Structures are given as C-alpha cells and as structure tokens.
Amino acid sequence: MSGVFAEWQPVYAEHGIATFPVSIVGKDKKPAVKGYLKLGSKVSGQLAIKFPGHDAIGLACKRNKITVLDVDTTDERVLADGLAKHGPTPFIVRSGSGNFQAWYRRNGEGRRIRPDPAVPVDILGDGYVVAPPSRGSRGIYEIIAGKLDDLGGLPVMRSLQVAAPIPLTNDNAPGVD
C-alpha cells in the first residue's frame, strides 16, 4: 500500500501543483527533502517513486502561486472573520488538528506570521503548507469546501492596505489659507 504522498502527487501534478513529501511527528512538520521550495513537477514526480510511504504532502506557496490564510484555531468564527477581511475563496481545508486553511491565488503576499498578534492567523504566500489529504499524528487534512479543480481559478486575497498618504501641497496643507 502506498502512502498519501505517492498516491496524491500525480493528482496535484494534474492541477499544475508541484508537491513534496513531509514527515509529521506530533506538532512538527518537516519536509523530507532539501530544496523543496524550488522543485518543479518533474522532480516532484520522481519523489513520489522515491518516497512511497510518506503520508503527508507539502507544497511551496510562492512557486505554486498560492497564498494560504492559515487559521491556527478550531474556532470557525476566526475563519469567518478572516474570510470577511480577505475575501471569499472556494477552497477551504481543515487541518489534522482541526484548524483551517483558506487558499487564494498568490498576488505577491509574503510569509506573515501573526500580522495581528491578537488573532491566531498567519498569511503564507511564501514558505510551504501541508496539503490535504495528508495524515498526521493528530488527524487528516481534509478539503471542507471546494475541490482541487478550483485551484486554477482561485481568487486573490483582498488586501487591506492603508491608502498611500496624500502629498502635502500649498493647496491642502493644514493651516494654509
């Protein structure tokens, strides 16, 4: 019996996503190969043969043009708030620990861990993410909204950047009449 990675690598490849094997032990998630952020589909396919027993799949966010809103809590209200803030997406994953991932098309987002320290949310536009249906020590990653066919048409994450300041001129400077 082959592992999740060997079984699902070709499925992700059909959708243009290069993947790599990941080892999950407890809370620790570690790529099983070096250079995982740079590998393409050809090497990914070779890895499926070399690592037939691995039960977790990773993908490089930047290389695969995906940004993940990583909600590090099982509280669905935090996910709902994140979707309200960053926009809807058809593809949502429940992680092995019961937390959530909302996937978007990458639009230059980097890796931002806890951009708001009060909210357990990370933005992963760089680095890697563990993908469904990976199996970890705490459970299985599962798609709870959407399907892999949605990956080609993901929306970009809505950014809430503050508008650029308006340059002061003699016409709009405070105290100038």
Image: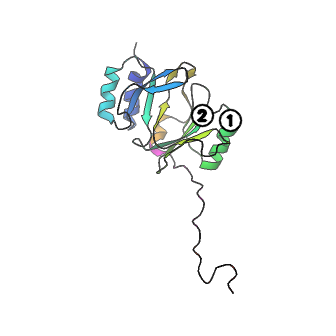
Viewport quadrant of the C terminus: bottom right
Instruction: Give the residue at the far bottom of this rendering.
Output: 177
Confirm or deny contact between disc 1 and disc 2 (CB under 8 A): yes
- Residue 163 on image: x %, y %: 59, 63
Q: CA distance from mark 1 to mark 2?
A: 8 Å
Q: Amino acid at mark 2?
A: Phe
Residue 133 visible (yes or no): no
Looking at the image, residue 124 lies above or below residue 159: above
- Residue 86 on image: x %, y %: 60, 48
- Which residue position holds label 2? 100
Q: For this rendering, which residue is in front, 50 or 30?
A: 30
Q: Secondary structure at mark 2?
A: strand
**Highlighted magenta segment, given as a residue range:** 152-164
Magenta stretch holds residue 153:
yes
Residue positioned 41% across, 23% down in the render: 5
Magenta stretch holds residue 23:
no
Residue positioned 51% across, 34% down in the render: 147
Q: Amino acid at mark 1?
A: Glu
- Residue 110 on image: x %, y %: 48, 47
Residue 91 position by quadrant: top right
Residue 19 position by quadrant: top left
How is the rendered protein coloured? rainbow
Looking at the image, residue 44 lies above or below residue 160: above
Instruction: Give the residue at the far front of this rendering.
Output: 175
- Which residue position holds label 1? 76
Residue positioned 47% across, 40% down in the render: 151
Q: For this rendering, which residue is in front, 120 or 168?
A: 168
